[in-house]
Image (spheres, rainbow, N blue to C red):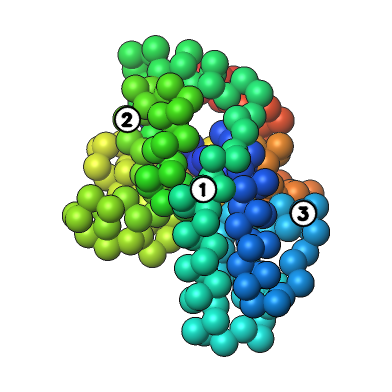
Amino acid sequence: MISHLLLDLDGTLVDSSPGIYHSFVLACDEFSLSPPSFSAFCPLIGPPIQEIATRLYPDLYPETLEEFRRLFRYDYDNLSYQMAEWYPGVRDTIELLSTKSDMSISLVTNKPTKPAHDLIRRAGLVSCFLQIVGIDYLAASSAGSVFSSKADALAYVLLSASSDLLQSVYVGDTLSDLEACERCNLPFIASLYGFHRWHHQQMPPRCIKNFGEIQSFLS
């Protein structure tokens, strides 16, 4: 029986690709870089933006890459994150699951905590979550530094909630989400409707084609 459901945000609960792409193109324009098409960009979403930029533009100098990251983050974290759209059935399912007395729900995302919390607040779901943890969660609360990876963020949430790994699971949409769970020995469920296009050889044993299917894995 699952007692702690941990959720990714981008590509799992919301389609944030329009806002991410918008901010990415703005940063590209600043450095006269040719951006990929929207359809080519979406499968890359998941890792930190500097990793995506490095993959697309491997010749960028470190100082240019840092400025690219800064420009992207300023626009996205303050404006373009609001372009996100909730996937069908997500809000209703979270509200339903939050009524179960034997289950806690936490959000763990690479997105900074403030915009992540704002999206949850705008959807009226804050009370459904035990924790809303972005990659800068500890730094934002002056309790520590930015997590070095999503695996570290997951480990923090599991420890702070005293969660039993055998009764916990993380739902995410990318290969990097799967790898983060493997580092924590945390069970993983892949959302096939998200950004990543899972190859047959990569396909995790537990997958959902829409968020409502998560209920079948929790008992």
Q: Residue at x 71, y 30 (%)?
A: 209
Instruction: Give the image location of residue 136, x and y in percent.
Output: 35, 55
Q: Is residue 74 above or below residue 70?
A: above
Which residue position is annotated with label 1?
Answer: 79
Q: How many marks?
A: 3
Which element is circle 3 on? helix
Q: CA distance from mark 1 to mark 2?
A: 26 Å
Looking at the image, tell me whether mark 1 or mark 2 is earlier in sequence order.
1
Q: Secondary structure at mark 2?
A: loop
Question: Label 3 neighbourhood size at 10 Å, few (<14), some (14-19), many (20+)?
Answer: few
- Residue 191 drawn at (x, y percent): 64, 37
Estimate how packed mark 1 is, as few (under 14), some (14 to 19) or many (20 or more) residues with alpha carbons within 10 Å: few
Percent coordinates x, y for residue 56 in the rendering = 70, 72
Q: Which residue is mark 2?
A: 130
Query: Closer to the N terminus: mark 3 or mark 2?
Result: 3
| Nearer to me, 97 or 50 | 50
- Toward the viewer: 213 or 65? 65
C-alpha span from label 3 to label 2:
34 Å
Three-letter amino acid code at the position of disc 3: Phe
Q: Quadrant of residue 43?
A: bottom right
Mark 3 and mark 1 in contact? Answer it, CB < 8 Å. Answer: no
- Frontmost of labels 3 and 1 is 1
Direction from residue 171 to residue 157 in the image, left or right: left
Q: Amino acid at mark 1?
A: Leu
Would you name the residue on which mark 3 appears? 38
Does label 3 or label 1 sit earlier along the sequence? 3
Seen in the image, is 149 located left or right of residue 84? left
Q: Residue at x 50, y 75 (%)?
A: 67
Q: Mark 1 and 2 residues: CB-CB less than 8 Å, in contact?
A: no
In screen coordinates, is 167 left or right of 58?
A: left
What is the quadrant of residue 68 in the picture?
A: bottom right
